[in-house]
Image: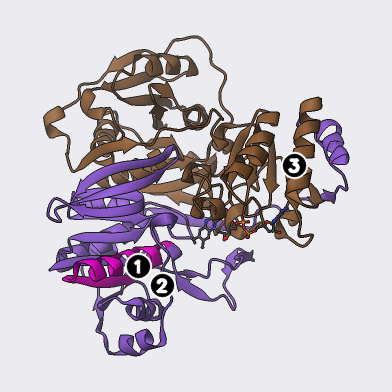
Amino acid sequence: MMKILVALKRVPDPDTRIRVKEGVLDLDGVKFAVNPFDAIALEQAIRMREQLGDVEVVVVSIGTGDCVEQLRLGLAMGADRALLISGAEAPDSLSVARILADVYRRERPDLVLMGKQAIDDDSNQAGQMLAALLGIGQATFVSKIELVDGRSSACCARETDGGIETITVRLPAVVTTDLRLNEPRYVSLPGIMKARKKPLEEIQLTDPTLKAPARTRVLKLESPPPRKAGIRVRTVDELVEKLRNEAKVI
Amino acid sequence: MEKVLVISEHEGGRLRRHTLSAVAFAAKVAAESGGRFEILVLGEGMGEVAGELRSYGAAAILVGDHADLRHPVADKHGWMIARIARERGATMVVAAASTFSKDILPRSAALMDAGMLSDVVGISMTGGEAEFKRIMFAGNVIATVKLDGAVRFLTVRSAAFVHPVPGADVSPVVELSVPVSELPSLIEYGSREVRVTGRPDPTEARVVVSGGRGVKNAEDFERLIGGLADAFGGAAGSSRALVDAGIVPNSLQVGQTGKIVAPDLYVAVGISGAIQHMAGMKDTKVIVAINKDPDAPIFEVADFGIVGDAYQLVPELIEKVKAK
Ligand SMILES: Cc1cc2nc3c(=O)[nH]c(=O)nc-3n(C[C@H](O)[C@H](O)[C@H](O)COP(=O)(O)OP(=O)(O)OC[C@H]3O[C@@H](n4cnc5c(N)ncnc54)[C@H](O)[C@@H]3O)c2cc1C
């Protein structure tokens, strides 16, 4: 039996423009979603179960009761069971990694699948930090995974700045997903019905070391200055003239 | 008094230019805090890269040169960086934001129980303490953040820190020993697809011409987007749509989750202007949008917009840019 742990983060819907109002995030009326990269991670885990058969897919989220919504969505997509880690603040990637390391030690998965970044804070760190804390391998920005050597390793294609790179990482490992790995399935009505009966366990963190203060302290939030309005040009000649003589960029 | 360790990035034995933005950051921190900075070069056959870095005022160029470090795999490089940061008593470890640094630095940070900030765009020293600025929520929020702890890890956006001008070659080169038997061995490097175009990387060009779903296929992309990029002597980029469609490689994707660019001129051709795309290019000096839909959101950030069919406008633009 192979076990795959997938971390799901609750984030604002990717298509809403978040604003700052009087120094705080204005989340009034904002809808929430599963971080899109995490949905890709879960889709990958479900596909591996469909392909290999004897795979258990466990989803985990750190946060308040609100995250139950995203965990239920994960179960509706096809995860087998869900864990809600409450009683812990996870304001930065290192805290997330510490808490997930604790979950890892309880669950002993063969593979941890995570999104490469969360689209709210765009840190792109938690998976790598988790792998380091556990002393296991990592493959980041992955667009293809294939289990090799009798499922003891994963051959991964990674999307790097210079193009596609392939590496083979020994399992257990943390793999973080990029956009091209797959297209997550839609949640079906029968899926939602089934999800209601699947186990969702809440774990209250009591280990004081996991409540270690975060390394990051946010002092201030502000909106970027708006770009000044531009103009429409009618012809290519006019455009070239503006670029040459007004903007002086050519 | 900060002691900054800059992690250099190189490819094919050549320095990646954006390393110099991390050097600029480190020089600023060192100057303002009365500290110093060193630059680390890990790899194999690093003589030339190390030599080139000697002229930027670093207290030392540290070189870990070994065959086992030839490929930038996260387990080995992450471990080496943490070890050297510890040995040198670094208070900050910084690299230019890229898939290289984002893969490796968080690993080193966790090994040192250190906090990290990605994509830093500003720093100020207030009362001897560093405050960093970074972008969140797809470019819609700027956060001012402090990092606690004895050592802090950072990646910086290359466009936010102007490359320093080289001076005299004065930084001494220090060869470090590489404890080969202690290096972890969890990841085996396979291969890297070879880049085919002769064009610069979108993050390193003065002009970027990007194509979106309005461009139908790879031939049209090469003719229209590649052609216009060449006319400007710039780079080609794209929206996510064309990468997903397999029309262009992932290395061209500009956006929140691709490459962040801030060139002098960005030309968006057949790109609607989704939040995620704009997060990757809206710090450009001059934005030009070419789109057949007059209501496309890209026009809201464009300095010069032209409504029309890219298939007619772009060939004419190529001609006229070339004509001078
Ligand atoms: C998690 C996540 C991450 C993402 N990351 C990124 C990212 O990093 N970068 C990114 O770009 N996107 C990203 N996206 C996708 C983004 O939301 C948009 O879907 C994408 O940017 C749209 O690409 P497009 O503008 O090319 O296509 P479309 O939105 O389909 O727009 C095509 C445009 O072309 C115009 N057009 C069509 N034909 C012509 C013609 N002949 N002449 C002129 N104009 C024409 C149309 O009017 C339209 O405005 C991400 C999405 C998610 C959910």
Compared with B78, A18 (above or below) is below
Q: Does the image show residue B97? A: yes
Amino acid residing under circle 3: Val
Residue A43 — which label? 1
Compared with A215, B34 (above or below) is above
Q: Are marks 1 and 2 in contact (CB under 8 Å)?
A: yes
Chain brown in the figure, letter? B
- x, y percentage for residue B217? 59, 49
Front residue of A196/B321: it is B321
- x, y percentage for residue A48? 25, 65
Q: How is the image coloured?
A: by chain
Q: Which residues are magenta?
A: A37-61
Q: Residues within 10 Å of mark 1 (few under 14, many from 20)?
A: many
Front residue of B285/B210: it is B210
Location of the N terminus of chain B (image quadrant): top left
- In the rendered image, which residue does mark 2 sit on? A185
Q: Residue at x 73, y 47 (%)?
A: B311
Amino acid residing under circle 1: Glu
Name which quarter of the figure residue B192 lies in: top left
- In the rendered image, which residue does mark 3 sit on? B314
Q: Residues within 10 Å of mark 2 (few under 14, many from 20)?
A: few
Amino acid residing under circle 2: Arg
Q: Residues within 10 Å of mark 3 (few under 14, many from 20)?
A: many
Name the chain under label 3.
B
Compared with A159, A243 (above or below) is above
Q: CA distance from mark 1 to mark 2?
A: 7 Å
Left or right: B85 with respect to A105?
Answer: right
What hue does chain A carry in this figure? purple
